[in-house]
Image (cartoon, grey):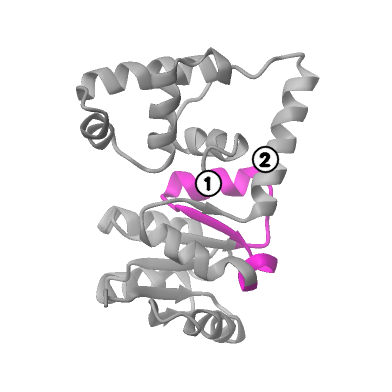
Amino acid sequence: MSKPIRVLLADDHGVVRKGLRFLLARHEDIEVVAEAADGREAVQMAAEFSPNVVVMDVAMPRLNGIDATRQIMQKNPRTGVVMLSMHSDESYLVRALTAGARGYLLKDSAEADLASAVQAVAQGKSFFSPAIAKTLLEDYVRYLQQRNLEDSYDLLTDREKEILQLLAEGKSNKEVASLLNISPYTVETHRTNLMQKLNLHNTAEIVLYAVRKKIIT
């Protein structure tokens, strides 16, 4: 049997942490190894316990969840972070992704999706509440309609589409190059081209675009 996924829960409400622990306890492949009641404690606990996944509330005292995530990722980029939030608007999601989070879960969907989010992020994948993906897609379609624009996805070559998905899944240029048996320089060229075609400026925007288009879930 493989080792369980080690999880750190970070939320300033004890009753919420208790509920999250209860939800995860149903799954034999997940083990809650520590809890934190504020952002600074979350950073300390992450360093002490080296969890595979941190479930991090966005709004916390002493250090907010997004800044705590950024500090955790700086110390251990292999840690997966699932951001737990009441906010479905894009600004919070962009900040969370930029800080290094791989999952973004609305609190009202935690009961149904928390374990799946932890399992996905532990495997290096992304996970977003279904409502988030739906909202992003609707906002994107509205944006295009208001500006009389067309989606540029079909302008991408098959190779660019392939690389877009791998980058959105969290792969580095080097990893993409290895998977596709091409040089990192070629990957970077394709990356630059697809970002120009889609008007994207960083990795967080690549992930957001892929979620909107249901390329990743």
Residue at image coords 43%, 65%: 119
Q: Quadrant of the N terminus?
A: bottom left
Q: Which mark is residue 136?
A: 2
Is 91 on the left-hand or right-hand side of 204?
right
Residue 146: quarter of image: top right
Q: Going from the N terminus, do you reach mark 2 or mark 1 first?
A: 1
**Where does the image place residue 188, in percent across and percent down from the top left?**
30, 21
Residue at image coords 70%, 52%: 131
**Where does the image place residue 42, in percent across and percent down from the top left?**
40, 72
Is 154 on the left-hand or right-hand side of 206?
right
Q: Magenta segment range?
A: 85-111
Q: Amino acid at mark 1?
A: Arg
- Does 180 appear above or below 123? above
Residue picked out by circle 1? 95
**Where does the image place residue 49, in percent across and percent down from the top left?**
28, 76
Is-magenta flag for residue 98?
yes
Q: Is residue 63 visible?
A: no
Q: Nearer the viewer, mark 2 or mark 1?
A: 2
Return the residue nearer the eye: 105 or 116: 116
Residue 45: quarter of image: bottom left
Label 2 Cα neighbours within 10 Å, binned few <14 / some 14-19 / many ≥20: many
- Does 199 appear above or below 169? above
Judging from the image, what secondary structure is the residue with disc 2 in?
helix
Judging from the image, what secondary structure is the residue with disc 1 in?
helix
Return the residue nearer the eye: 206 or 30: 30
Q: Is residue 198 visible?
A: yes
